Structures are given as structure tokens and as C-alpha cells.
Amino acid sequence: MGGVVIVGAGHGGSQLAVSLRQEGYENPIVLICDEPEYPYHRPPLSKAFLKGADDSLQPLRGEAIYVNNAIDYRPGKRVERIDAAARFCIVDGEAIAFDKLVLATGAVPRRPTVKGDDLDGVFALRTATDARRIKSAMATARNVVIVGGGFIGLEIAATMAAAGKGVTVLEIGERLLARAVSPLISTHVLARLAGAGVDVWFGTASAEFLGEGTVNAVRTHSGDEISADMVVVGIGADPDVALAVEAGIAVDGGIVVDAQMQTSAEGVFAIGDCARFPHWQLDRSIRLESVQNATDQARHLAGVIAGKHQEPYTAVPWFWSDIADMKLQMVGLSMDADDHVVAGDPVEGAFAVYHFRQGRLIAIDSVNRPADHMLGRKMIAAGYTPAPQEISDGTVGASFKRWSAAASAAPKGQRVA
């Protein structure tokens, strides 16, 4: 019996292998990873890892977990081809049969199509190997240019500035983190980074990386030249869909899956950063890059494969980022919001922005307000919307507690206002 083959051992793939055993799945599990390490936490690579005294990684779980659960972990291996109809894949020339195959291939950093992108000293961050190369170059670099004002770029910018480097961020848009947080959060992050010595250029794209063999400057699209001992590109990532495309599996801005993570090929599933799935909150298909989404989809799919349920995936999305002294936490998806209420005070460095659509709470962005984030995860999952006054006066937690008690006491099926 072929069992389950999982392609990719990041947060999603590793979680799926373990969750399958927790769900009672007894058939073979093969977990294939193109990196040489055991699965590790990726978020620290742009922060704690760069600051650390050594190059040790933070494992997702101990090696014994894979051995004790009879998970056939194959590091440093790459799947060459998938035959979805015949139910096998080729790994280093070996045909591995499967009953179910899961693509957890993640995403790959987007690279700028500019001259000099292949110079030494130009980096993108995705893997531990990338992080080690960046850390090595960081030791002697004095001036660093970060291309892109997203989470990865800003986390690295803050880390470099704290290490005493001169840091310039080039952002093609008009504000930082524009696709992820509200303008108020963007403004606050900009102010804190500027206070830490980070110079941010808006409306600016890189046109060329200059140097002979090794980068020494960045030329912008307007002709300015910025000195740079190293450049880190953080302009987003594209889903890794190459195997799916070659296998004839439907792809549209990600590997297309249904609410049970099933692709267009019978017995083939996709989870995590590579998957485009129907989102319950937005009523349309999206792709999310987050640890939470990858691990929650893995747990959900484990139940599907083990035959425990066929429920649609409806987890509440949440995200986080540590930038300098700011703990940014986001819950829900705010892109369709039409109203906002602020709790706390940005001047004090701790506040939250509650997002509403047609009077319903859909998301919360917070800075150094973890209680708002945790409460938001519960409220959005329960379908509760607080009154604006409750947010402003700090009584939203008590109001939700009363509402939850009433909902628990109400007859089954009765809606609580």
C-alpha cells in the first residue's frame, strides 16, 4: 500500500505527517524535503537567527518524533516528477507509489529583473542556507539596502540597524506593509524604524545593482546611487507550483484546491503557501503565506485523509511579525473593511485597529496589544461583533464574555444578538 507522500517539510508538511499519526492513520508516510536539515521554524531566520552567536536552527520538533511515529523522512531529496494518474512520483530516479500525495512546496522569493541581481552580496531570504549566507555577509557589511517594505524586509532592516549597520529601505509603494495592515500601523512602523536609524525611500524601485563581482551600490529608477555592501531583496514570493504544472494539476495564482485541500487531480492535495483555497470569510479563493495557515490546513487535511471528517476548512487566519520593539499581530483579513475603530494610543506604542465590513468585525491589527489579538481570534471565530464604544472604553472583553455565556446557555440553534 502506497500510503501518503508529502512533498515539502516546512511547517505544513511536518505538521501533516505528525497529525496523520495523531488521527490514527496507520499506512506509510514519506516526508520529502529538498533541504538537508530536519524541519525548523522559519520566522526566526530574519530576526533571532541573524543575532545569534551560532548557526543553530530552532527545530519544529525533535528528530525522535519522526522515528517514533514511523515517518520516513528524506532530507536533501527533490521530487522530479509526479504521475497523478498512476499514483507515483520520482525521487532521485526512484519511483515512490502513493495513495495520497500532498504538495506542501511553499513559495519561492520573487527576484527583481534588474542587471546585477547575480552579484555576490545580493540575497533573498527563504531557507536556512539563505539565512546563513546573509549572516556571514552581515558580519563585515557597513551599509545595507533592503529592497521591499514588507514583513521580511522590515524585520531584517530592524535587525541590521540594531547591529549598527547603515540601512536603507526601498519601497515602490507609498507606505510600508501596505497589503497587510492599516495606514495607522504603517505610519507607526515607519516612525519607529526611522527612530532606529532606518532610512526609508518611498515610490522607489531598484534599477540596477552595481559592482564588479560583488555588489557595492544600488541604482534606483530615478538614477540615485546608494552605497551598499550587501542587498537583501524582499519583494514577495511566488507559490512553488512547478511540479503541479508539469503534472497537469490546475494552477491559478497557486495550486487550486477545494475546501478539503483537494486539487484537480484525484488523491492529490495541496496545503500552505502554495495552495489557493476558498476562504470562508471573503467568499473567494485566496492564497495565504503564514505559519498558522499552513499548520491549520495540515491538521484539517490529516482528518480528511484519515477519514475522520469532510468538513470545509474554516480556520480564522492570524499572523505576526516582530520588527524592532514592535510585536505586530493580525487576525482576520481586513482587505474588504469599510470602517475602523482604534483602541489604545499609538503615541504610547501600544494600540489596535479593529476593522469592520458592513457593521461586522472582520479583522484586528495590533501593536504590542496581545490581549486584543487573542480576543479577536475568539470573537471572529464566534461571529461576535463588539460595539465601537466597547472598543474605545476597553470593555470589549467583558462584553464578549457576557455574550459567550448567553450563547452557551441559549437553546441549540437559537441565535444570540
Image (tube, rainbow, N blue to C red):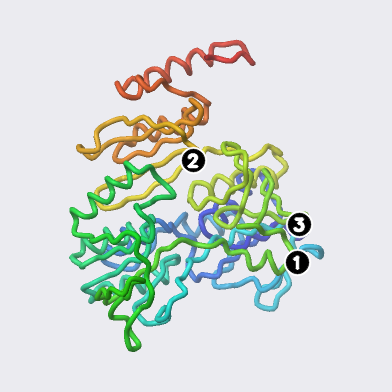
CA separation in Å, label 3 and label 1: 13 Å
- Which is closer to the viewer, label 1 or label 2? 2
- Which is closer to the viewer, label 3 or label 2? 2
Whole-percent x and y of residue 147?
Answer: 36, 66
Mark before the other along the chain sequence, 1 or 2: 1
* Residue found at x 40% / y 33%: 374
CA separation in Å, label 1 and label 2: 37 Å
Whole-percent x and y of residue 403?
Answer: 47, 16
Looking at the rendered structure, the kind of residue marked 3 is Ala
* Residue found at x 42% / y 78%: 117
- Residue under numbered circle 3: 265
- Residue under numbered circle 1: 88
Farthest residue, direction right? 86
* Residue found at x 53% / y 47%: 293
For mark 2, give the secondary structure: loop
Whole-percent x and y of residue 406?
Answer: 50, 12
Q: Which class describes the residues within 10 Å of circle 2: few (<14), some (14-19), or many (20+)?
A: some
* Residue found at x 50% / y 41%: 317
- Residue under numbered circle 2: 333
CA separation in Å, label 3 and label 2: 29 Å
For mark 1, give the secondary structure: strand
Asked if residue 76 lies left or right of residue 133, the reply is right
Mark before the other along the chain sequence, 3 or 2: 3
Asked if residue 89 lies left or right of residue 140, the reply is right
For mark 3, give the secondary structure: loop
